[in-house]
Structures are given as structure tokens and as C-alpha cells.
Image: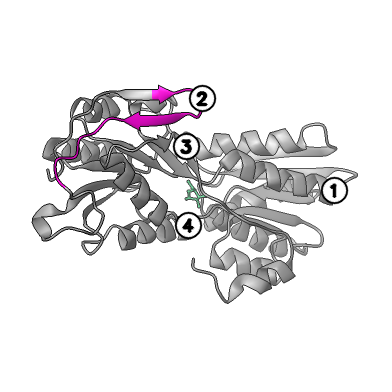
Amino acid sequence: MSVQRRFTKFLGLAAVGALTVGLAACSSSGGSGDNADAGDLTTVGFVAVGPEGAWREANEKNIQETFTEDAGFELKYAPATNLDQKSQIDAFTSFVDEGVDVILLSATEASGWEDSLARAQEAEIPVILLDRGIDPDDPSLYITRIAPDNVEVASAVGDWAVEQFPDGGNYITLEGPAGVGVVNERNEGWDSAVDGSDLVEVAAQTANWSAEEGKSVTETLLKANNNNIQLIFAQNDEMGLGAAQAVEEAGLTPGVDVKIATIDGTLAAMEALADGQLSFVHEYNPLFGETALDVVNKTLAGESVESYIIVPSEAFDSAEAAQAVLADRQY
Ligand code: AHR
């Protein structure tokens, strides 16, 4: 362990939600790139999700490309085995036992982290949540969460939908897997925007972030509703792209008969928006590695950070908007 730490105490500053972690870094190796040699590297245990789709690939690649030895870090990447939480908990425990300097956690499940977080706190190892929140949301158990604001993102999608359908319409929601924190946050944001409108949810079903399941679930729901669906809210791009295939195979035209809105903003979705397969795409910006590195350096230097760091994300509501950014997309 390259950084000798002495936590004075977690001071929750209610006014700004900031956490101040009293640390006395006894070495200058806070990952600031000023390390003389490998022995001074800041060790970072990254409890990751692993293969899940284009968004996850972009996010985890960005983290790995940011926490490099040149930047003063030894990043230990631990992707889950088949999205299994137990493999994440095992990796988390191993990182605590080996005494890494900091743990980054992208949780496959929102619940079940209490014991792990308590062990990290007892070992005085700060934990930083990336993307996914956890339940109970007790900011005293972790330093901060870095993510776009799912509630705000989904609320913006809902606002667009209400504007598109002033006279209402039938819609289906394709959700991510049950138990994943962002799914509840996206439902909350969407519901807050569409409640009181004439949009009617005829079905909500998980398609597990997958294009294949997005297609099969949409096929089933279109048949069950005699194709009387005007809108699909897909909580990620892959499910929306699969839904577009099902819409076409049902003899309907995406963007005309059925509008499809998605969240993530990956290249495939932006291309689909540009050619009219999708009608609205809200980014859920995965490229926050530099923010995470700054938070790690500040935490290990004993500086305060906000308890929730929101990553800015853009909305794209037309083919023209997508075409304008396609050439420069980084993910
Ligand atoms: O937690 C973020 C979600 O996880 C993304 O929206 C989805 O594509 C990923 O699998």
C-alpha cells in the first residue's frame, strides 16, 4: 500500500452533501503522475461489470485508459463473471485484503453491498461508485458516486415524448435487468415527466440491456396489442435497436408508425437516429475517467468532494442533430 492513510473522520457536510475525508497522505504518491518509480504507484481496485454492451465497453475502456502507470496508478481490473454479483463481492474482498489504496465500484446489483463497504471502511480504503448507485444509499459508506443523473436523463426523454404525442398514445417500456439501480432511477424520471399526460403504458418488461431481447420482447408486445403501439421507451440503446427491428418486421415504419427513444448515445444508436430508425437518443455519457481520476487524487490528498458528481450528458432529438456529431463520436 503506497499511501499511508489516517482517516480522521468522515464529516458529512449536510449543506452541500460534500464528504470530507481527513487523510494524511504520508507519501506524495497520490496518483498525480509525480511518481518516481513503480513502487510509488497508487493501487486502484476496479470492481467492474465487464462485457455488457457498447456503453459498458466505452466506460470501462475509458477508466482503464485513464488510470495508467504514466498517470501514477496501478489499475487492477476485476470484471464480473457473467454479471454475477458474487464474483464482484469476491473481487472487492480481495482488494480489501491486499490493501489497495482505493476501490472503484460499478455494481451489477444495487443491494447486497453493506458488508463489503463496512470491510473497506474498517480497512480505511475509500470506495468510489462509478455509474451505478447502491441501496441503501448511505453516502457515509462511500466517498461519492460519479454518473450522469438517470432521473434527469429519463425525465428529459419523457418530456420529449409528451411533446411528441400531445394527444397521447400507447407505449411500452423496455427496462434493464431487475435489481439494477439505474432502472429504478430511469423509471422515476420517465414517470415524473409523463404522469398527467395522455400517454398510456400498455406494458413494461425487461429486455436485459440486449438487442436480441429488445427485439423478441417488442415482437411479443406488438402482437399482444395488435400493433397499436405508437411509442417505445427503451432504457438503453441496444434494446431500442432491437425494438426497431421488431417494428420493421411487424410491417411498421420506425420513426413514422412507432417512435423509439433510447438512453446511452452509443455510435450505433446515433447512426440509427441519423437514419430515422430511432427518434430520440439521450446520452448517458460514459467518458468520465478524468473525473474519476481527479476524485481519487482529491480523496487521497484529503480534499473534500461532493457526494454525487453528475456527468453532463446531451439529448439528440433529430436526424440532423445526430448527423452533426457522428464524425466526432468518441463511443
Ligand atoms: O448503468 C448504465 C447502463 O448499463 C447503460 O445504460 C446500459 O447500456 C449498461 O448496460
* Relative horizontal placement of residue 209, taking residue 139 as reference (left or right): right
In terms of sequence position, does the residue under pointer 2 or pointer 1 come before the other?
2
Quickly name the residue at label 1: 165
Could you tell me the amino acid type at mark 2? Ala
- Mark 4 → mark 1, Cα distance in angstroms: 29 Å
Which of the two discs, 1 and 3, sits closer to the camera? 3
Q: Is there a contact, CB below 8 Å, between mark 4 and mark 3?
A: no
Amino acid type, mark 4: Trp
> Magenta includes 22?
yes
Q: Quadrant of residue 22?
A: top left
Question: Which residue is at 37% across, 36% downward?
Answer: 304
Mark closer to the observer (3, 2): 2
Q: Which residue is mark 4?
A: 55
Reading the image, the residue beneath label 2 is 15
Say which amino acid is labelled 3.
Answer: Tyr
Q: Which residues are magenta?
A: 12-27
Label placed on residue 308: 3
Residue at 73% x, 71% y is 320
